[in-house]
Image (cartoon, rainbow, N blue to C red):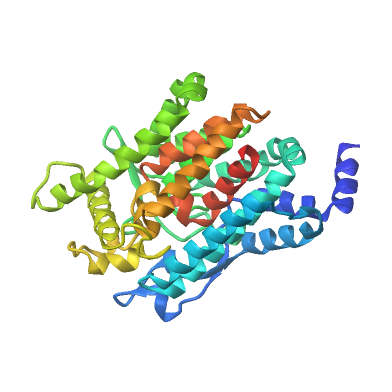
Amino acid sequence: MKVWSAISLFGQRPDLFFFALLVIFLPSQLGLHFWPEWALVAGIRVDYLSPTIYFTDILAILLLISNLKSLNLKPNLKTKICLIFLLAFIVVNTLNAINPSITIYKWLKVLEMAGVALYVFRNKEVVAKFLPRLLPIPLFYTLILALAQFLNSGTVGGVFYLLGERTFRITTPGIALGAIFDETFLRPYASFSHPNVLGGFGLVSYILGSSLGLPLVLISFSEGAWIAGVATVLLRKFLSQIHRQILLSMVLISILLMPIGSMVMQVTHTRLPETISNRLRLSAIAGEAFAKSPLIGVGLGNYIPFIPRSAFQGSQWFLQPAHNIFLLVLAETGAIGLALFCLLLFRVLKNSLVTSAYSLMPAVLAVMLTGMFDHYWLTLQQPMLLFAIVIGILF
């Protein structure tokens, strides 16, 4: 009866059908990449800059189109003023960008995610009802794929290729490895671009109500996700009282990483682990970008094109975003952009205190904590969509 009831509901509400598909295929990174000249930096193709049509993009667009009539957008005067200010900021940020084409593409991506968040916001009750039932489906096949990669020490292939699984082996140069008792093993990627993304995705999914997210956090061997998970558990009871202080502390710590990174860059040899020193160098580059355009940034999506213009001339590894979401926003959109981003996070945290979704408030904390170590919540398709759903639920 439940199956027929769901089918009947989907027939009456096509938007719910597309939302269900979007959730089921959230881990997918199947997409068609394009390589215009502006997606290259120093002659090198950069995945982060490549305009891509993902399968989940198609589902998101169909979701929004099927729900246009019910959105009933009638902004009040205050909302209209805010939208005009935001539009003016987007225009100025684009005109000031190192590469305006990249910025236009990235703002269109932000618009798509905002549309998904708005849909979830306008349909909170039905989303809250269906999400815990739908999430176990993508998490189950993701866990199966991750375990298979771990045991196989490489790609599984077959049908998983359609989810966007990339081809790799434990011997592939640059592949993420772990070690236990001097035994080296492959950290599973599943259909994500890195095990850290798998870990963060699993952590937030676990908080949203699916226990299958927890084994994904464990098997990812993502230290950032593990630290964020422990911190979320410890802070959960106090989150309603100290959410302002937590957000402010994260922003201040992130800003301090810029001068610390600059000092590390000036040292020829450092005893710091390479993963930490590299992140600090990327933080220093973010500081240089901020110094170049402190109010409006170097253009959304233009952190990577800025790298060759920075004082640090690194290897190809460094053609990637700053591994801190606050610094990345600051570098690309300046102090104004960071203020708007923090205002969004604060609004989400504050609103969740007085809504039925209070139990999901730690999901935002998990995003912020993992975002202190990495950038994927703002740069990669799968976590961006999950982040948009979280914002929609809690806004």
Question: Residue farthest to the left?
Answer: 268
Q: Position of residue 75 (x, y in %)?
A: 69, 53
Whether residue 250 is visible here, answered yes or no, is yes
Residue drawn at 19 percent across, 44 percent down: 260
| In this view, 175 is above or below 207 | below
Q: Position of residue 48 (x, y in %)?
A: 43, 64
Residue 217 is left or right of residue 136, and the answer is: left
| In this view, 326 is above or below 132 | below
Q: Position of residue 37 (x, y in %)?
A: 41, 80
Count every numbered label the image shows and give the total. Answer: 0
Q: Position of residue 49 (x, y in %)?
A: 43, 68
Looking at the figure, which quarter contains the C terminus? top right
Residue 126 versus residue 212: which sits nearer the camera?
Answer: 126
Question: Residue farthest to the front?
Answer: 77
Residue 73 is left or right of residue 206, and the answer is: right
| In this view, 270 is above or below 63 | above
Residue drawn at 37 percent across, 41 percent down: 372
Residue 87 versus residue 264: which sits nearer the camera?
Answer: 87
Residue 110 versus residue 48: which sits nearer the camera?
Answer: 110
Residue 26 is left or right of residue 260, and the answer is: right
Residue drawn at 67 percent across, 64 percent down: 58
Whether residue 152 is visible here, answered yes or no, is no
